[in-house]
């Protein structure tokens, strides 16, 4: 989820430097205070303001974000699926179907139950090999790790 804030951080820093330029570099002069005061201003005023602005911009653009990641029941490779709204474009529902990045097995992610399953009629071709190799330790459906913002 940290990477979702990177574009907004770049915009926030750009606004900070633009504001510095508009004020005739008054912010730069404040940062050139004696070391202790400059440190305090930078870490307790400028950085929190930039972080708050970046998080606010991210929340304005990305709404109801949920990133689910889990192991492919076929080969054990970790796969990631995003649920949420970016600007006004919705993700389209509570389930995402995608293919494993390693073996190509179709996977179905469910944001409500937070489970990864194989779609109806799909079989894991290498399930026995994956179990023998220790790549998959539990039976489907696999529980997903999740992070919310």
Image: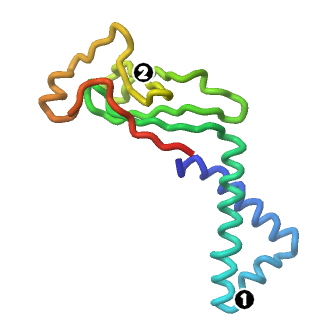
Quadrant occupied by the C terminus: top right
Residue at which label 1 appears: 33
Up-down: is 41 above or below 65? below
Q: Earlier in the sequence, mark 2 or mark 1?
A: 1
Which residue is outermost to the top?
121
Which quadrant of the view contains residue 108?
top left
Q: Is residue 8 above or below residue 74?
A: below
Who's the residue at 16% across and 35% down the image?
A: 134
Write down the residue under mark 2.
108
Which residue lies at the image location 87% right of the left edge and 73% below the top edge? 23
Q: Residue at x 61, y 51 (%)?
A: 5
Give the residue furthest to the left: 132
- x 50%, y 38%: residue: 67
- Please report contact status of discs 2 and 1: CB closer than 8 Å, yes or no: no
Looking at the rendered structure, the secondary structure element under dot 2 is strand
Nearest the viewer among 48 and 14 is 48
Density class for disc 1 (Cα within 10 Å; few <14, some 14-19, many ≥20) is few
- In three-dimensional space, the C-alpha distance between marks 2 and 1, rounded to whole angstroms, equals 56 Å
Q: Secondary structure at mark 1?
A: loop
Residue 147 locus on image (x, y percent) = 48, 43
The answer to whether 35 is drawn above or below residue 7 in the figure is below
Q: Position of residue 7 (x, y in %)?
A: 64, 50
Residue closest to the eye, 80 or 10? 80
Residue 20 point in image, percent of width and height: 80, 70
Residue 111 numbered mark, or none: none
Coordinates of residue 22 in the picture (x, y in percent): 87, 68
15 relative position to 106: left or right? right
**Residue extending furthest right?**
23
Looking at the picture, tell me which residue is in the foreground, 128 or 23.
128
**Residue density around tag 2, few if under 14, some if 14–19, many if 20 or more, within 10 Å:** some
Task: Tell me if 90 is positioned left or right of 147 in this view.
Answer: right
């Amino acid at each position: 989820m940290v990477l979702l804030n990177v574009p907004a951080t770049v915009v926030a820093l750009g606004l900070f430097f633009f504001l510095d330029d508009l004020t005739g570099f008054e912010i730069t002069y404040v940062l050139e205070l004696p070391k202790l005061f400059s440190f305090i201003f930078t870490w307790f005023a400028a950085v929190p303001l930039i972080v708050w602005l970046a998080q606010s911009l991210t929340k304005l653009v990305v709404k109801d974000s949920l990133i689910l990641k889990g192991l492919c029941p076929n080969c054990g490779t970790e796969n990631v699926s995003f649920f949420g709204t970016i600007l006004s474009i919705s993700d389209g529902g509570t389930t995402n179907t995608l293919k494993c990045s390693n073996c190509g097995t179709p996977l179905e992610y469910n944001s409500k139950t937070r489970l990864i399953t194989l779609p109806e009629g799909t079989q894991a071709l290498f399930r026995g090999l994956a179990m023998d190799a220790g790549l998959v330790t539990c039976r489907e459906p696999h529980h997903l790790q999740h992070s919310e913002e």
